[in-house]
Image: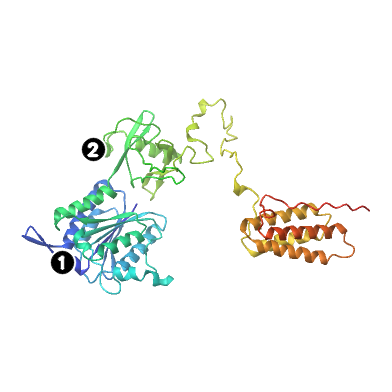
Amino acid sequence: MPTVILMDVSLSMTRPVSLDGIEEFQRKNLAVHGLNMLFEHMASNYRLEFTALMAFSSLWELLVPFTRDYNALQEALSSLEDYDKTCVESALNGVNNLVQQEWGSACPCQLVLVTDGSLGIGKGSLRHSLQTLKHRGDDKKFPLPFPFPTKLFIMCVANAEELQMTDAMDNLEELLRLSGGDGQIFTMDGPLCMKSVQGMFGRLIDYAYSPFHAVLHCGNLSSDVQVFPRPEPVVMDEEVEPMPRTVNVDEVGTGATDELEEEPSASQMAGKSPNFCVLLHGSLKVEGMVALVQLGPEWYGMLYSQADSKKKSNLMMSLFEPGPEPLPWLGKISYLGPISEAAENPYGEDDSKSPFPLQPQVKRSYAQNVTVWIKASGLQTDVQKILRNARKLPDKTQTFYKELNRLRKAALAFGFWELLKGVADLLERECTMLPDSAHPDAAFQLSHAAQQLKLASTGDSQYAAFDHNIVPMHTDFSS
């Protein structure tokens, strides 16, 4: 999950802060100290994640594009310059462009906005942007919410009392709400000092950047692993009493352990000891296969190798939806087992057959013959088909009523009452235009069908039942 650091370099960030009555710092110095602390943590625990650094005032500038080089990020922080007023909206547009160009709109991203809580003044200020949200055209929409999943963390180099003296906190909370609400606002506790800013960024690290250590098991083999990004709790909507499901560190893999394993030793990290994770990754990469992994009770995923360049590849884990049958074509995961335990080889002696995909017991609705009118031409074709059969009555009586009932059911499903009335009028017109040589039964069937459609078009439950079919009128004509 890439991270964008959005650093406020407006004039308000140069306001002095007295530390212990001896040395004088600017708010910008406190922010830089906090970000250096974050970068050092990420360099040790999040080496595989990409981070970009942007600075903004009335305009925005990309200081460091997405990189894993945290030394470059820290060097850019040490040479920040001061600019003019704050314009958050312009900076958010810059973030939107940067992330979409690099990652597209499907990759989730974390945005860390570092500011002093000053909203700016006049046009372009956050206050002005939020007040004009409902009075904008499509070409000047506010950038939030982003088209990609976002977690917004607002780091205020100010304490809560200072922000609540104005409407700054209310506006920042509205900004967080517009982003989707998935994030948090952090403020400094107590006086503005190095210790307070360390505490604030420490809370951010605990909340969003704490490492996720787990143990991967496969029979008697096991390996300590670290997962990036940290798996999020999943809440299933269809549950009567939804409970968030989390990945347990002692249940990753095909088995479970009752005690937590120690973190990887220095020799393992250096590659001096055999490591099951390395063996698994290499095997999956060479064979082009995936491995099923159990994350908790009735929660599964898969492990596979994915290359991000010609030389580098990563061991990836994709999580399925919690449940015993996350993949309908595979059936229950717990029923899977080695071929040797089966009564007979499910793939045949010569691998000529396969037990998959499993056929569903209930026929899926999308596999049935459902009438759908996407274009006017489709509806016109169905109506013309009915009229063609109407002109060939009584020879085409069964086909005529089959097509008529198909159209009737679709019209009732869509609430398209006018269509039923319109087709009834067409049938009555066809009845009046029958030639003298037409069979007498044709006129009776057309009048009967037109009358039934008119009754259905009233919406009366007695005649507009979806499961009801119009049956041919019984007549007795003899030669």
Location of residue 218 by image quarter: top left
Count of marks, rendered view: 2
The one nearer the camera, 266 or 60, is 60
Look at label 2 and name its amino acid. Ala
305 up-or-down from 83: above or below: above
Q: Position of residue 51 (x, y in %)?
A: 30, 55
Closer to the N terminus: mark 1 or mark 2?
1
The one nearer the camera, 328 or 226, is 328
Q: Secondary structure at mark 2?
A: helix
Look at label 1 and name its amino acid. Arg
Q: Position of residue 16 (x, y in %)?
A: 13, 65
Q: Residue furthest left?
A: 22
Mark 1 burial class by Cα count in 10 Å: few <14, some 14-19, many 20+: few
Reading the image, the residue beneath label 1 is 15
The one nearer the camera, 145 or 74, is 145
The one nearer the camera, 304 or 335, is 335
Q: Position of residue 201 (x, y in %)?
A: 22, 53
Q: Is residue 159 visible?
A: no
Q: Residue furthest bottom?
A: 122
Q: Is residue 205 left or right of residue 288?
A: left
CA–CA distance in space, label 1 to label 2: 44 Å
Q: Position of residue 311 (x, y in %)?
A: 36, 48
Q: Are marks 1 and 2 in contact (CB under 8 Å)?
A: no
Q: Secondary structure at mark 1?
A: loop
309 up-or-down from 455: above or below: above
Location of residue 10 by image quarter: bottom left
Foreground tag (1 vs 2): 1
Query: Residue 476: which disc?
Result: none
Reading the image, the residue beneath label 2 is 266
Q: Is residue 409 left or right of residue 295?
A: right
Location of residue 193 by image quarter: bottom left
Q: Is residue 79 visible?
A: yes
